[in-house]
Structures are given as C-alpha cells and as structure tokens.
Image: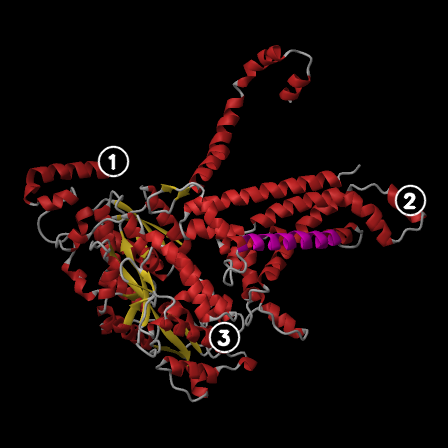
Amino acid sequence: MAGADISGGMTGRASGDARLRPYLGFIWPALVVCTAVIIFPWLFTIWMSLNDWHIGSERAFIGLANYANLATDRRFLESIGHTFYFTILAVFLPLVLGTMAALVFHKKFRGRGFFRALFIMPMMATPVAVSLVWTMMFHPQLGVLNYLLSLVGLPPSQWVFATSTVIPSLILVEIWLWTPFVMIIVLGGLASLPIEPYEAALIDGASQWQMFWKITYPLVLPFLVVAMIIRTIDALKAFETIWVITNGGPGTASETLNVYLYAQAFAYNQVGTASAVVVVFFAIIVALSLVLLWARQKAKWT
Amino acid sequence: MSQSISRRRALQGAAALGGLAAPMLNTVTAYSQSGAFNWQRFKGQAIEIVMETGPRADLVKKQQKEFEEKTGIKVGLEIIPEQQARQKTTIELNSGKPAFDLFNIAYHVQKRQIEKAKWLFDITPWTKDPQMTPAEYEFGDVSKPGWDYATQSDGKITSLPMFVDYFIVYINKELFAKKGLQPPKTMDEMMDAAAKLNDPANGIAGYVGRGLRNANVPLYTQYLSGWDQQTTKGNPPELLTDTPDAIAAAEYYKKILTSYAPQGVTGFNWNECQGLFMQGRAAIWLDGIGFAPPAEDKTKSRVVGKVGYILPPAGPKAHHSVFFGGGAAIPDASPKKEAAYMASLWMTGRQMTSRMLQTGGGVPFRSAPLKDPAVLSQLTIPKEWADCAAGCAPISMPGLPVIVPVTQFRDTIGTALTNMLAGADPATELKRATAEFKPILDKSEQG
C-alpha cells in the first residue's frame, strides 16, 4: 500500500523517502523471520545441491554434477513422467466428478443436508488411515474390491500390485478423497450465480444441457480454475497415499518425484542429490503455477 | 543432572587420590573401584535408549523396572517404528549430539555406514575387563556371526549382538498331508511341492514370498545362498550379482513366484504373505523366523497348530539359511557410556535373550538359551520352531552385503527382481542393475 502511495503521488522521491523513514524499522521483524524460515533454507538447499553430501561421509563441492547425474538418471526421469501422469488424472477426474456432484447437490431435495455431509466425509479422514484401509481393499486375494468384481462377473484385477494398473488404482483413492473438496468449491460458486440468465433461457426454450454448457459452465469456470489450482498443487505434492499404499512400486512404477526425493534423502542419505531434486521440483512447480495463473486470468468473467 | 556431576567430581577426586593403581581404567572413565563386577556401580545415572518398535522393544519396556532396580540406573525408553528409528539415529549421530546413550543397530542395514562414520564407542577394552563385564555374560556363548557383525573392519568391537533373524520355511501341514507330501529338503523338491499344492481355482497358492521391490532382496539372497554365493565379496566389496550363479538363482526366483504364487505377488511384502498364509491360503512361505507368534495366535490365524517350521531347502551347491540381525550400540558422543554399557549387557545377556526367545520375539545370537530345557519349557510357541532356529545357526550366511548404500542396493536389485516377475529376462535385468549400482558402490567406498 505504501509503495503504491509513493510512486503514484506527485511528491518527489526524496520527500517520499523521508516520510517513509520512521516506519522502515517495522520491516525488520518480518524480514528476519522471512530470512530465517524461507530465504536461508532455500539458499542452503541450493548450496547443498552443489555438494556431494552423504550422511556419514565427507562433504565435497562438486558444482553442477548432481544435476548432470539427474539428467541421465532413468529413475529420476521416469519419476517426472509418473508425477505428470498422476497429477493430470488426479486433477481432471475429481474436477469432473466434483462438478457433477455439485450440480446434483445444488438441486433441492429431501435430506440434502444429510447427504451433503455424508459426501464430504472422505475429505475429513486422515490420508494415511484412508490409505491403509485401501491397501487392504486392494489385496488381490483377500481384498474386498476383487470380491465386488467377482459379484458382477468381472475377472479379478491386480490393482496396485501390477505395473500397468498401479497409478490408475492410486487415482481411485485420490478421487475418493478429493472429489468432495472440488464439490464444495463448485457448490459455493453455484450458490453465487444470478438466476436471471436461467429465467431468460427458459423463456427462450433452452434445454437443460444448453443451460449448463452456455450459462452455468462459463459462470462457474473461475471457481473451477481455483479448484484446479489447489488440486494441482496437492496432486503434485501427493505423498502419503502413494507411500503408504505402494512405496513407489511395484518396482518403480508409481514412484513420483516426491517419493524419489524421499528415498534419496531419507533412505539413501544422499542429501546432495536430494537437494538437487528439490530444486528441479521447485522449478517445475513454479512453471506450472505460471501456467495456472495464466489460465485463471483467462477464466475471469469479462 | 547436578547430582550426577557432583558425584562424578567426587569420584574423580577419589580416583586421583587412591586410584592410581588402575591407570588404564581412568583413561576411559572417572569411575573406578577395586574388586569384582558390580551392577550397582553406576547407580544414580539416567540414560536414554532408542529402540525399534517390535517384540524386543516391548520386552525391554516390560522388564525395564527390573533393570532399574538391579542397577539403580534410570532408563528413558523411546520406541519408534523401524524406518523412522533408523532415520532418527542416523541423523542424530551425524549431528554429533545424539539425544540417546544406547540404540539398537540393525547390522544388515547400518553397519558399514556407521563404522565408516566412526559414530560408535569402542567397547573392546570393557569386554576384556572383569570389572566392567561379568563372567556370567559368557562371551563364548555368542556365535561367531554375531561377533563378526559386532566387530568393525578395524577390529574394534562397538556393539553387543542381541538377536539374529534367520530365513526359514513355514509350511501348512494340513495342505501337505492332503496331497501326501513331505516337507521339502531341497530347492527342487520345494518347486515340485509348490507345483502340486498350487490350486488357484480354490484360492490356494502353492508358494508365497516377497515380490515387493527392496523387501524381495533377502528372499533372493536366500535362493542365491543355495548356489553358495553372496552378493558381494572381498574388501573393497565387489558385486557378484551378475554371475551365472546369480542369474540361475534369479531364474529360480522368477519361476517359483510367477508359476505358483498368487496374482499380484509383485507387490507383496511380508505382511501380505503373512496374511495369506495365516488364512490358510498359501502352502509354503519362505521368510524371516519372527512370524511364529502371530501364526500361532488363535485370534489372528486360521492355521494354529498346523504350521510346520522347517529349514530353508538346500540349493544345488550348498545349504544355507541367510540371516540378518541387530545389536545394542553406544554412540561415541554419549556422556554416559558406562551406564549405557550396563544396559546393553543386560539387554543382550542370557536372561533377557532367553525371554526374547520364549515369546518368539527373536532368536538370540547365543546358543545356550536354545539348548536350555528350562527356557524351552516356557516357550509360548511350538518347540519345532526353536529346533528350526537351532538348526539354522550352523548353516547361516549373511543375507545382505556389508556396504554403505544397502538401501540403494536393495532398491536397485529389488527393481530388477520385480521386473522379472513382470516378465523381464533375469540375465538382462541383473546385468543392468549391477551396472547401475556399481558406480554407487564404488563411490561409497571412497573417502
């Protein structure tokens, strides 16, 4: 606020500075805290990533060698692929299903409050506990999911125990956990919509689908984008469900960047390599955020 | 705290006056006394112990009072799950100021890393000192593999061996009897038995074992031991994971798990295997020796009284049981090493390890408890299990290489094994994994 005041005002720069001076001292507490908890750890991480640093061994400065190794590390490159695969599905499907759920729960019917509450329950559960339950359900012989498949005459699936089905199976857990979250945001959006366009559309004889596609969807889009941004960040960071259910396996088939990072840092004690992964991960997140922010600008009501 | 300092000062004074006769002791400790071993010698101190969650930690917790009364040393016990405990101890030891005075070291994972970093206190002089170690401790009773684990490559003893984990075969006797089969003695017999017992239509697997990356490596090294080979040899260690014998063992691993194990075994760790076996839905299960108590627990298992505990089958070239193990170690940075040493003597001594055996919580590196009728009569699980443990000792072979990046080794070789279960060729996979791991191993041995 103060910054805008100075640059926007007609007063000269010098007098602006003079007006500001008594208040400069107030910056210090925030500056110190930011430096201590954000800037310093960041710089330290970057510095660690330039070192060959294994817990229990001597540390040695090796420049960008950690990054060069990552560029040819098959496991690391695959984990980037897994991260994107996982993120795209874990964002897109809850968005679609959450929007549908919101449309349903936006209608008035008996017991709506009760069912809404019921629907939101998964979101309140602890991801680790949920993951443990799902692990049991996924068991190919003793799990309930294959039993359910057998009831409708379908062959059993290997779920998280086979390379080809592991990520879609994990997405199932994500959908179950996070669809309610998308629903809440979209429901909020729906509640804020004006009713006039719908009245006009009805008079003009529009169908339900036309009303949704031409009115509801564009009006709710900004909310969807917000939900998408939050979901994307969450999905990129997803760790508990993957770690608890598959540990990144079978083999490395569900190893995302986060899981790989954890293995480097806490299983292999390779602090240097892990820091390099963090830096790369951060760059990816920043790039994605820029894309999402751009999408948000695009989605604004005009 | 202040009490212990003043006590230390007082004793230092006493030592300076009268303890000149024992100069060797005074270099290690301010405490000195003449005469025999005395449990009460370090009375009044307080120590912190970190242990991994499990039956051994439960036992220490249960008997903690006994130790405190016996020695007058107060014990703070922190019990954390295995993975977190290993992270915690590694990070705290690296910081130079660990908050614990004694912890349980997992030799098969941590040994090389910890000895290279020189984090542990050298207890060699104390083990030879009758004032610090009582005769009742019976060093000779602890097996050679135990002392090999506890002795660093520089010859120093830095921990006391506590328990050993052998790989054994669990069989469902009822299923064996139905088909008129005898327990397998060789790996070929085991393959045959698995083929005959496998009945997927009725939900019965002939065989079950770990397929999950990392966890599957010990199972593989058990097969490999049948070809009389380990995964590395020499010092500095050289990888042996792409030799013809290593490939033959991998082919066995692939065949038995893809032909006679249930769908999805690629993702099985011991708990999935255990679940199937305890439901009576697997005929043969090869895994660590510690799973007898739940299998014999009526509230958890449907195979109580039907489980056979047998030695792992012999391979074409040799007969071994791979083992893993743990001990009690004192950080070099601990200020209360003497009291911690008393606790480690107690934890790894005959009485506590006998109790551990009785509850099925672990097998001691000692042989006396396994032969003692008084101990065996109190077993909470079938005696056949203890006999099996006793039978494993003479044929034991380390199950994992003593190297720094053990976890990375397990992940790399484990991924190759998992890929084989999905159809990949054992020779190609092992050669790729070995080539991938070699630079990591070489680097870890430098500096």
Residue A92 is inside the magenta segment: yes
Q: Name the amino acid, label 1.
A: Ser
- Look at 59% across and 64% down and name the residue there: A165
Tag 1 subunit: B
Q: How many marks?
A: 3
Answer left or right for B199 relative to B330.
right
Q: Nearer the N terminus, badge 3 or badge 1?
A: 1
Q: Position of residue B434 (x, y in %)?
A: 40, 62
Q: Residues within 10 Å of mark 3 (few under 14, many from 20)?
A: many
- Look at 14% across and 43% down and name the residue there: B27
Tag 2 subunit: A
Marks 1 and 2, how far apart at CA: 84 Å
Label drawn at residue B2: 1
The reply to whether dot 3 and dot 1 touch (C-beta < 8 Å) is: no
Q: Residues within 10 Å of mark 2 (few under 14, many from 20)?
A: few
Instruction: Compare residues A138 and B350 and report the one nearer the observer.
Output: A138
Magenta span: predominant SS is helix
Q: Name the amino acid, label 3.
A: Thr
Stretch in magenta? A78-101
Give the residue number, with chain letter if any, for mark 3. B258
Label drawn at residue A200: 2
Marks 2 and 3, how far apart at CA: 65 Å
Q: Position of residue B386 (x, y in %)?
A: 30, 73
Secondary structure under the numbered disc 2 in the rendered image: helix
Marks 3 and 1, how far apart at CA: 64 Å
- Look at 38% across and 75% down and name the residue there: B169
